Image (cartoon, grey):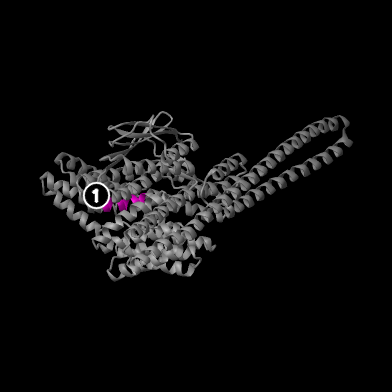
Amino acid sequence: MLALSYTGVAQNNLKIVDSLKTELSKTSREEHRAKIYGDLTWYYSQISTDSALVYGKKAMVLAQKLNDSAFLAQTISDNAVVYYLKGDYKVAKALFKKSLKVRTSLSDSAGIASLNFKIGNIFYKTTSLDSAMVYYVRALEYYESHHIDVIANSLKSNIASIYMSLKNYDKALDYLKSNINYFEKNKEHELLGNALVNLATVYLYKQDTIEAIKTLKRGILTSEKINAYPTLGSAYNNLGTIYSDKGDYKLAKTYILKSIEIRKKTNLSTELASSELTLAGIYNALGEFDKAKPLLLENLEVFKNEGITDKLLSSYLQLIPAYAYQAKPDSVAYYTDLYVKSRDISLQEKMQNITSEIETKYQTEKKEKQILLQRADLAEKELNLTKKNTQLIGLGVLVFMLALLGYLLYNQQKLKNRQLQKENELKAALVKIETQNRLQEQRFRISRDLHDNIGAQLTFIISSIENLKFGYKIENSELNDKLKYISAFAKDTIYDLRDTIWAMNKSEISLEDLQARITNFIDKAKESTSNVKFEFNVDETIPDNVTFSSIKGMNMYRIIQEAVNNTIKYAEASQLEIQINQIINGIEITIKDNGKGFDINSVEHGNGLSNMRKRAQDIHADYHIESVPNQGTAVILKLEVEET
């Protein structure tokens, strides 16, 4: 239900497109045509994504032919934006990262910030909130330091969306109200409409539907001024969802169909699938299961391909009563099993609704079986009457009816046993879900306690030391050094605490999450030393769906941290490289420096080396160190991986 901000949206796009096409017909210079192709890609992205891709590919071809790196980076990014709007987040992310490499080689800080913003949006859309926040914060640092207030406020809107997802609604509300005041004052209608849709979502989460409806309608009026179709599609979809929850299905259906009309017009496939999912929910609520089922099945692949877990779960959930209505217990069991195996979402209330639907259907089946038995009794009475007229015919009919009755009773018992088995499976699934939810709540509670209590105490220690040094002007250099050491140690402990909380809040960690965390750590390491050149590379052939358990991911991260810290402290190195490569049935992580090295056979293993070895043993990884005096050191970690 959230809408993310994008930058650089033009007004009156149709007029601009017509003007560019006229200009294109009058020029033959390749440099000029390449520029027009790029502009057409951008303006068409808000009108027709298919047309935008046609011109985007032409722009990329000419950019490569002209050997213009800056223009090539821009055309790659423009094409990525189009794929983002189409909902193809996998292709969009790959193109954005390709453009980021070119921008980085050109030291283009403005272009890098823009791409960090856009990559953050993709991570948010695919619910990788940690990675999204990392990229958003990187972009925000640039825009705030250069006083580019419009984009900085747009970024803050998206950060507010992350706070919404984390259920910190008061924090999200503060961000959004500040943004809305700025956008309204500066007449940024596109960004204002987007922020209003997000603000309405916060009100809805806070159960204030009156304010949510009022804010959505205000967002629609603002967005209609500039034909901001993506925002309009979200606003109408959210209105439909609200009225559906209120039981006003007629009005809900009107708004959802309006959302579908807009999203079809702009080829926003993923958003269109979301609206159709909402419409399917309305059909289910009205008991029109035959209309709901095709919509749900049609969009399953969209949500699977884009990794949109909450929508996929909702689709599974709504397919269960549809198949129960059709008396297809195998399909009910299949989609129930798919739903149960999913993670990180609250299922209790929805699963109770499913149970009610299935139990109602099973009760209907029982009544039908009772009718069959009643019919058998009537047939038996008719048999007795016929028996009085003719003994021979009566005997034959009696034999036939007894056989039929036996067959019916056999089938009845078989169906009853199957029904009991399905009910027991569903009860076991509910128990499993409740257990998982309790474990997840316990993990969140522990992580909150760590953050709120220990984190606050460490921050108090740091603040007290700074106040002590400032207030008393301590001249004793030894005492000053000791206070600095305590303060630095407390800050490092806070960073370690944040990493631990990050891991605790996840049931599993993707390679993307780990990569983002390592990148963030390297950025901090660069601040502490200017003598070491860092390089971090990940093998592009590693599948995107590689994941680790939270324990395994955290231990891998700590091993890399320890190896990097050892290089900085002891190796006297000028270069340090972290490489993640794919190997058979797993991955290999190498942390290598060109420092002074050491004799492995004679060196005494301190806490650092022992800790790395112990962590590797805990996650069943193959760990060893290669080092030669004056030739550097390499820490090598090999482990099996899982794919989801």
Q: Which residue is more in the foreground, 121 or 65?
A: 121
Q: Main secondary structure of the magenta part?
A: helix
Measuring from the top left, give residue 634's x and y in whole percent.
34, 34
Picture quadrant of residue 136 = bottom left
**For the point 49% across and 65% down, which residue is it?**
206
Is residue 233 magenta-colored? Answer: no
Task: Tell me, yes or no, if residue 49 can be seen here.
Answer: no
Is residue 119 magenta-colored? Answer: yes
Horizontal placement of 516 versus 7: left or right? Answer: right
State whether residue 522 is above or below residue 19.
above
Q: Name the residue under label 1.
A: 41
Task: Tell me, yes or no, if residue 318 can be seen here.
Answer: yes
User: Image quadrant for the N terminus?
Assistant: bottom left
**For the point 37% across and 66% down, which residue is it?**
468
Measuring from the top left, give residue 362's x and y in whole percent.
67, 46
State whether residue 273 is above or below residue 379.
below
Q: Which residue is more in the foreground, 117 or 596?
A: 596
Number of residue marks: 1
Q: Badge 1, how many Cα within 10 Å: few under 14, some, many 20+?
A: many
**What secondary structure is marked by label 1?**
helix
Horizontal placement of 69 versus 202: left or right? Answer: left
Q: Which residue is more in the foreground, 184 or 541?
A: 541
Measuring from the top left, give residue 115's x and y in whole percent.
28, 50
Q: Looking at numbered disc 1 in the image, what kind of residue is underneath it?
A: Thr
Picture quadrant of residue 307 = top left
Q: What stretch is highlighted in magenta?
A: 112-122
